[in-house]
Image: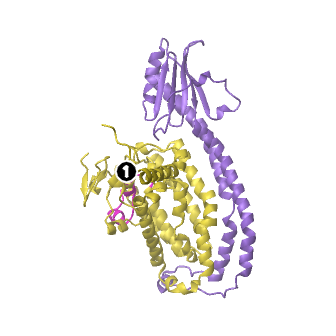
Chain colours: A purple, B yellow
Amino acid sequence: MSSTPIDDAPKPGLFDWIWHIRGEIPLAPGQTSEDAFDRVAPLFDARGTSHRRMGDTLTFDKKDPDAQDKMAVFDRGTLTVDRNGPAPALRYHLVSRALLLCFLAPLMFLSFAAITIAVGKMDTPAKEEAAKKKPEKKDVQPPQSVIDKWLGAPAPESLKKKADDANKKDDKKTKPTSAYVFAGIFAVLYLIGRFLEDRLIKAQFRKRLLGA
Amino acid sequence: MEGVRVGKRMIGTQAPVTIGWENIPRVEGGPFKQAFFTWFQPAVLFGLILFWYYAPNSIAKASTAIGIGIGFRVLMLTMEHFFPRYESWRLTWKELATDLFYVGLGYTILNVVEDFIGAGAIIEAVQHSADWEKFHWFTGLPLLLQAFLISFIFDFGQYWMHRGMHNWYPLWLPHSVHHYITQLNINKGAVGNPVELFLIGLGVGGFFDFLPRAALLAGALGLAVGTYQHINVRFNTPRWWRFTFNTTEHHSLHHSQDFEASRSNFCNTWIIIDRFFGTCVDGEAELLGMEGGRRMSIREQMTYPFTEGWKSIKERIDRTRYGQTSAVPAE
């Protein structure tokens, strides 16, 4: 698969930190680009990963990476050996669609909440109409097995009480609470992922480069 | 690969599997750890049965069951982290996010659709028109018998639905996406194409809402047995349990990369149904998935049944119209 060195792209935008991870690891004194890339190369010998070296730059792309691929969360990226600073360093710029989608997921769940509310408003008059038409049923106590009685299980509720509870449950059916909860879960999940994946990939590169 | 003969079938000719309980590793460690992983499953099952049997009516409600279910899943997630069955199934951030996306779909938009045109709508219509007093012969049975019957009848239906999915191409298309999972984790049961998730929701479980306590007891069986289908924890499951109930081992074989192994162990809870019909294979597998374990992206999971279905229809039309056959290398 062809890949464009993403460091040739425009400089970091205001919001691209959401799904772009950048960082650098200082190289050992005298370490060549070739040696540095050789050390991190096993990370790119994974299914669905293609990579290309050009001098001081390594680019990679991923498609359907394995679940246990150490870089599964990234879709493409560039690693560059930078010798312009005070000390040589491996700079990396990685792009993750998974992080972007996780960042946007709360919006999707909030839209599900809006749909749920809209559907609930449409549904309520029909339910009220149906409830009015329903004839009042006489209250009947359901039977309980003698074995259950003997073992001390609570007596079952009357059918009328059950029907009342069921009607209350109908009211709850179209509540958007779960959509709000999942919007919150994904907001937290994004924060964890943005922090965790940043640290994990840095640790991977550091471990392989410095053998630490 | 040689494979192992199980009945008339050769299992494990395409991918490694372990057949036979005697060949499956056990939890190792001190006596406390061994006892814990031997008795955890039965203790939870009997604990839940006792709870739902004796809980007062004010507590024996669906909302309590939902709370217990969430708590149990969090406990299982913790156990997966500290006691993984396979390192190769370890939960990563991306896997967790993917799984929770599907769990979220199930709790939100699919729920709304189910209420409108799925099981919710059907159940409501039937419940409002039926005379439940005619079912007093059933509600007069001992609670545990009612719960067993609900659970078993429901699982019997699921067994045939699931077996149908593996044998009839139009049903296989939506189900195939679930078989692209490459590891088992607690929320993997929710991963699948929304069409399949909708079809599964068309179960009969909701019809038993008029018997809350028996239905809750049946639900406890599902929670305390069915949950272990997709989980990355090893247990020293007692012999009577693995003879009667579905286990992670059975379900890992069902998800194996080996085709014949994947055509076994169709039930959710009662593996004895598979034993009755000759589809039970006792064993386990670590390498899971389709196409050699290719992990499918969410985007492909959403479109796969439709794109594959369209390809098949087009192929069939071409064959009928032009008498074309599949491409054959020109040699």
Q: Chain of mark 1?
A: B
Residue A116 versus residue B28: which sits nearer the camera? A116
Residue B28 position, x and y percent, is: 34, 49
Q: What amino acid is found at the position of numbered circle 1 in the picture? A: Ser
Mark 1, residues whose alpha carbon is within 10 Å: few (<14), some, or many (≥20)?
many
A14 lies above or below B136:
above
Residue B108 can be seen, yes or no: no
Residue A139 in the image: x percent, y percent?
A: 65, 87
Q: Which residue lies under the disc numbered 1?
A: B256
Q: Which residues lie in the magenta part?
A: B230-253
- Quarter placement of the N terminus of chain B: top left
**What is the quadrant of residue A91 in the picture?**
top right
Dividing the image into 4 quarters, which one contains the C terminus of chain B?
A: top left
User: Between A42 and B55, which is closer to the camera in this rendering?
Assistant: A42
Any magenta on residue B245? yes
Residue at the (57%, 81%) spot, across then down = A156
Q: Secondary structure at mark 1?
A: loop
Residue B239 position, x and y percent, is 32, 63
Residue A60 on image: x %, y %:
51, 28
Is residue B158 found inside the magenta-colored segment of the image? no
**Picture quadrant of residue B157:** bottom left
Q: Nearer the viewer, residue B270 or A63?
A: A63
Residue B271 as seen in the image, left or right of residue B81:
left
| Residue at 67% from the left image edge and 70% from the top image edge | A170
Residue A91 visible to the viewer: yes
Residue at 45% from the left image edge and 54% from the top image edge? B230
